[in-house]
Amino acid sequence: MSSASPEALDILAMTEPAVEHDKLIVTVSVNCRSFEKSDGGISLRARERLRISIPWNFPLNRPEVEFTHDRFGGTAHVQWGHSICLFQAPDVEWQAGRGMFGFMQRVHDWLKAAAAGQLDPTGMPLHPPVAYPVANFRVVPTRNVPEPGEGFWSGYVEITRETVYVAEFGRWIAQNEVIPDVRLASVILLPTEMPFEYPKTVLDLLVALIDRGLTLSMLRLLMTITVLRTPPGKPAIFVLGAAMRGIAGGERLQHLACWRMSVEQTDKLRAAAVASTEENPVEDQAFYAWAFESNVEWCRVLEDRPEIVQRRDRESASRWWRGKRVTLVGCGAIGSAVAMILAKAGVAKLRLIDNGVVTPGILVRQGFRRDQIGYAKSSATRIAVVAADPGIDAIEEYSNIVWMLTDEAKRAEILDADVVIDATASSTVAAAFEVHFRHHQAPRPPIVSMVVGHNGDMGLMILTTDKSAGATLDFDRRTKLALADRTSSAKFLEEFWPADPTRRAIFQPEPGCSSPTFRGSYADVLSLVAPMTNVAADWLREGIGLPRSFAIDLSADSKCRSEARASWRPYHVLPDSKHGYEVRITQEAMSAILTWTRRSERTAGDRVETGGALFGQVDEFLKVVWIDEVSGPPPDSEASREGFVCGTQGVAMMHKEKLSRTCGSVTFVGMWHTHPKALPIPSRTDLGAMVQLLADKETFQGRSFLMLIVGGTSGRPILSAGLFLRGDYDQA
């Protein structure tokens, strides 16, 4: 390399490694005449001598380079007075394949930029100043610092958590504020810069601060208060900020440095401050002795200030959870995983509800430690959440959610959230939510429910919104119907609504005394819960009010990850005036009814009645009737202006087909007919037909019959619904 460019680079000396795995030291002279110089640049000589240290395992490890003098000490990107900071991110920027040619090109570019004052070009991050750590101690600022303004800012910062190796900082407290009786570190924030290399002695540090407008008496007072607020056996901690952080050419933020006083010296100054009197100012003597004799024990600062740190997940779907309030029902396999995902994402509040206890068997796949056996799951989950982020308002509830929903105050606490996540996989819990929302129409947060398949390799998630007529149970049913209509989703249908009796066999990990559950590992649970949580975040971020579902298949027999998604338009909801049922008609069914009505108006006239069969499901516990599909008039029907007699030809076959296709979720539930240009009030004929139908168990064996009447016209329909129960007509 030297022979190829004798003017640009001369090798002056070479020191071979003295021992195995030692470095090769090469001293070179570099021609700097061609570098354009500016007022803000480094004053390079015509030739500069550099010392290059080449590691034994070069090029796997990169060389280091330094000046052979200290003329540029204190300059940005020059450390210890002579060492050149050549790489900002060595692990990424160093390219072993380019060898010494690539390294020397980097040196050339650095010298050129240094001479032109372009080491921190506009738009690029500033190189922060250097306070060389000498203590095996770290501090973590977690909140944005106050603005120092034109003058300096002085005060304190609350130490919220402390171990032997680290202290976390919380609230910043100005000197003129009421100072709380807690562990504090003193703080000085400067609107100006400090030297690139911070002073190594206390005396030099004090001189640098006095040069920047602070007084010695103020510094002494600040440090004395900190020493007095430091418990015995603890080191006093001090924070120094300077406007040296940010993007070149942009706003300057505070760069924080921290130093601490040894425990011995802290105790000595505290004792002197307590014992000091006007006649015997031992405090003054102790302070000056410390200042003149001590080095600064700089500590490493691990930034966690939002104004400094760019979150690594800010482009992730999980960013939606940040700052949100979440109620998590169920802290088992699914819930404990969701809780940690939300904690890492930065939720503001997390209410954890579960009435279970940590047992030995669940440790293989739930987020608990062995020393937490016997803890309430909600408590153990809270411990993990707070350990991940102490700033989260984590509330544990060792209680049964079904009971809580019956208590008005508890129900209000549960629903005081941006979203509720049901991770119980319990049909009872789903029914409890359904009952509550069936009878309490007040605004509610979105409800997300998650379940895992029996082998831990398939997952299903459902989102219902505040505009949904039903909750999870309702849209679990609709998901089943959507999958039943897709041949590609047969595997999901069989997994979550199995028709095969052998698939319905339960798995009890402790036969006879444990709840049925799924087979699967911690890794299996995380692999399903993570994408479901991200998909939920995407849905919630979009803010679309449609309920929807998401199914995921990661099973070994799948060639690749497969998914199924569905969403639904709102029901057309009718009250049942007879028994208080709620009739939920799908948009598709409503559209079919109006289509048949328009056809009758067009072909038979706008005064002739028409009708057909209704197919859906009746839930006597929830008191809900679903209408999913309808038919037009069967072939043997009779239609006239006087009335409509619905035939039965083909209805049994339609009932059988729908029952089979939907795995039992859609059956015959009743009939619909029109009252053209009239109100949809049951006529004597209609009521008589119900008496005849339900009083005779031989003709119709169902427990109930829904009569849906469409009045008005197809353009402006008026609907009414009435559910007639067999019990109303019992002759006994």
Image (cartoon, grey):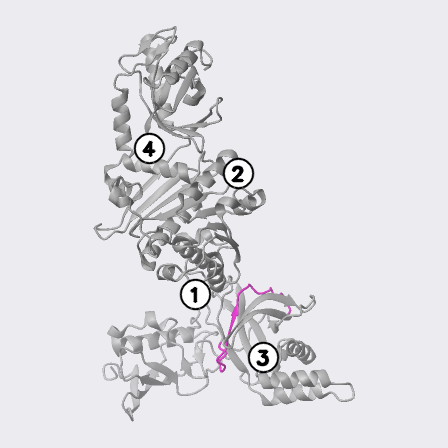
**Which residue is denoted by mark 1 in the rendering?**
124
**Which residue is denoted by mark 3 in the rendering?**
234
Instruction: Report crowding for label 4: few under 14, some 14 to 19, many 20 or more residues within 10 A (C-alpha).
Output: some
Instruction: Work out how far the residue at label 2 is from the one at label 1, CA to CA, in angstroms.
Output: 48 Å
Q: Does residue 371 show up magenta in the picture?
A: no
Quarter occupied by the C terminus? top left
**Which residue is denoted by mark 2 in the rendering?**
443
Residue drawn 33% across the image and 33% down it: 665
- Who comes first in sequence, dot 1 or dot 4? 1
Q: Nearer the viewer, mark 3 or mark 1?
A: 3
Instruction: Work out how far the residue at label 3 is from the one at label 2, CA to CA, in angstroms.
Output: 52 Å
Q: Does residue 147 show up magenta in the picture?
A: yes
Which amino acid, mark 1? Answer: Met
Residues at discs 2 and 1 in contact (Cβ within 8 Å)? no
Left or right? Give the position of 444 relative to 603: right
Query: As displayed, is residue 93 above or below residue 266?
Result: above
Q: Position of residue 101 (x, y in %)?
A: 26, 77
For mark 1, give the secondary structure.
loop
Which numbered tag is attached to residue 665? 4
Instruction: Report crowding for label 2: few under 14, some 14 to 19, many 20 or more residues within 10 A (C-alpha).
Output: few
Q: Quadrant of residue 714?
A: top left
Residues at discs 3 and 4 in contact (Cβ within 8 Å)? no
Instruction: Report crowding for label 3: few under 14, some 14 to 19, many 20 or more residues within 10 A (C-alpha).
Output: some
Which numbered tag is attached to residue 487? none
Quarter occupied by the N terminus? bottom left
- Who comes first in sequence, dot 3 or dot 1? 1
Left or right? Give the position of 465 relative to 61: right
